[in-house]
Image (cartoon, rainbow, N blue to C red):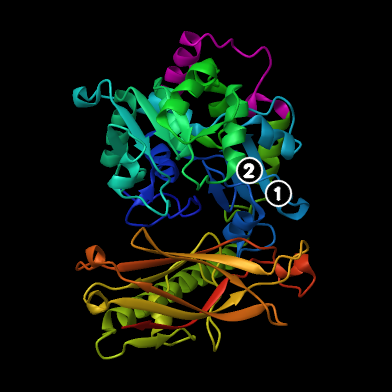
Amino acid sequence: MAEEIDKRISYYTRGAQAYNFGDYLTEYFVERMLVEPFVWASQYRLIGSALSDALVDFDLNGLPDEARVAFWCCGARDENGLSPDRRARSDIWGVRGPLTRQLLELPDDTPLGDPGYLVPLLHTPQKIEALAGKTASMVHVFARDRSEEFRRTVGADVALSASVASFEELERLFDQIASVDFLFTASLHGAIIASAFGTPFAFWDYGEVDIPFKWQDFCALLGIDCEFNQTLEQGRLWWEAQGKRQRLPALVPMLAACPFTVRPSIWQRAIAHDAAKGHAVPAHPVGFDRQDWIDLARQRNRARPDPDSAVPARHLARAELQAASKALDQAVAEIDRRMKALELDFSQTPQINFAQGAAGHALMTQGWTPANEIAPWSLPPFGEIVLPAGSGWERAETLSVSAYLYVPKQADGTTSRKVWVWLNEVLAFEQSFDNTGDGDSMEVNLSMPIAAHLKMPRDLVIRICLEPVPVPSELGVSDEDRPIGLAPLWLKLA
């Protein structure tokens, strides 16, 4: 990419060294298809299972009360959808499937479809002769075992990875999916891209189905039964009985719902595509062709904090200087943080803590609340700690994190919470913790080996993910209305 995309556009693992290719489609669309937003929002989400209270809280954390999130053709993560207060701060421009539309009580003519179906408008796959007639498997990007050996255990000829680091790798994956004879996948966007390019597919269940609701919503979109399979043979039978009956969504309604300006050439291709697939031109306006959608867009734009409005020049200049000062302060703080991180030598300081101003605080990147005298709390979807290359971490055999874990008693009586830790995209720790004490938090220790193949001269990216629980205000234990996760106390290498 020539430049970083708009900072208001959110997606999972943005800024990482490698991406889940379904999330990375966000960057691809912005670069190849979209121009700029014409509906104002504080944050935008353009693809994925993003309609959840936790992600709305994550996107709006620290922003003023009038801040809003705009979702384009996203799907709900579960049957809870959005609570009324989060829904009031969200603008929904199309959804992935009919289950999400029904869950959010949206109008019946709300455009449906996953933006992944737009990929053929942006890329013409190059057939790979070596893959002709082959079967392929694809595990979820965060599967416990993502090794090629495991991906081949199901009997597929080739094993595809859902992790990409560039547009070149992304398009190479498109070519691979379009070239194989059959895709057995635990990645939803693997199935969507296969469906878009006409490759037979089936859903692979190896005991780790990710977000069941999204698969059900996707199948409801296509008008087929949602069924997971353990073997390739079962998958092929499902395809013959169900998969090949799929009804692909029209593309024009999705583009019509997009809160961004779409390049004219993409519109032309979408119209030609829909005509070739037999989709009728809508008899009534859809998306932003509808007057109520247009009125809402105008309302949102009028309500935005617009520096071009009739503000006295002196006040405007003061506001601009204040904004510039704030940005400069943030830049200085970030430079200071990075300098402290680069100065750390684990051979001299094998244990660090995470209080405000401490060495560990300099290693924390995304997914944390502000630190206090003890530590910050992690936010969904993960809290990230990065040990810099050359700091000596690669000489250690084990990594341990001592932390406070928020494990409240929930309405159903549950008093446990699961924690996962990835080291450079490799799952290194997975455990459920049971809270047997009287408080809502407990002290835990996350101890894990550092695999030999990870010990390279590069950063060690530690991602701590938690099973979601209700926020404290929903449980009635405090007024805190944002998710609370894990507060690291110290990290030790040995």
Look at the numbered disc 2 and give the secondary structure of its residue: loop
Task: Kindly identify the amino acid type of the residue bearing the numbered disc 1.
Answer: Leu
| Chain-order first, disc 2 or disc 1 | 2
**How far across and down, in percent of the image, does residue 85 sit?**
75, 55
Magenta-colored stretch includes residue 356 = no
**How far across and down, in percent of the image, does residue 87 sit?**
72, 49
Q: Is residue 263 visible?
A: no
Task: Kindly identify the amino acid type of the residue bearing the numbered disc 2.
Answer: Ala
Q: Is residue 414 left or right of residue 309?
A: right
Residue at numbered disc 1: 82
Over which residues does the magenta segment extend?
265-291
Look at the numbered disc 1 and give the secondary structure of its residue: loop
Magenta-colored stretch includes residue 266 = yes
Give the numbered dot on residue 485.
Answer: none
- Front residue of 45/334: it is 45
- Front residue of 363/292: it is 363
182 above or below 47? above
Quarter of image, res 13: bottom left
Residue plotted at (57% across, 57% down)? 59
78 above or below 295? below
Q: Is residue 162 visible?
A: yes
Residue plotted at (48% across, 50% down)? 11
481 above or below 54? below
Query: Gap in Å between the C-alphas at discs 2 and 1?
Result: 8 Å
Residue at numbered disc 2: 76
- Front residue of 310/63: it is 63
Q: Is residue 173 left or right of residue 209?
A: left
Crowd rating for badge 1 (residues with CA inside 10 Å; few <14, some 14–19, many 20+): many
Q: Are marks 2 and 1 in contact (CB under 8 Å)?
A: yes
User: Considering the image in quadrants, where does the C terminus appear?
Assistant: bottom left
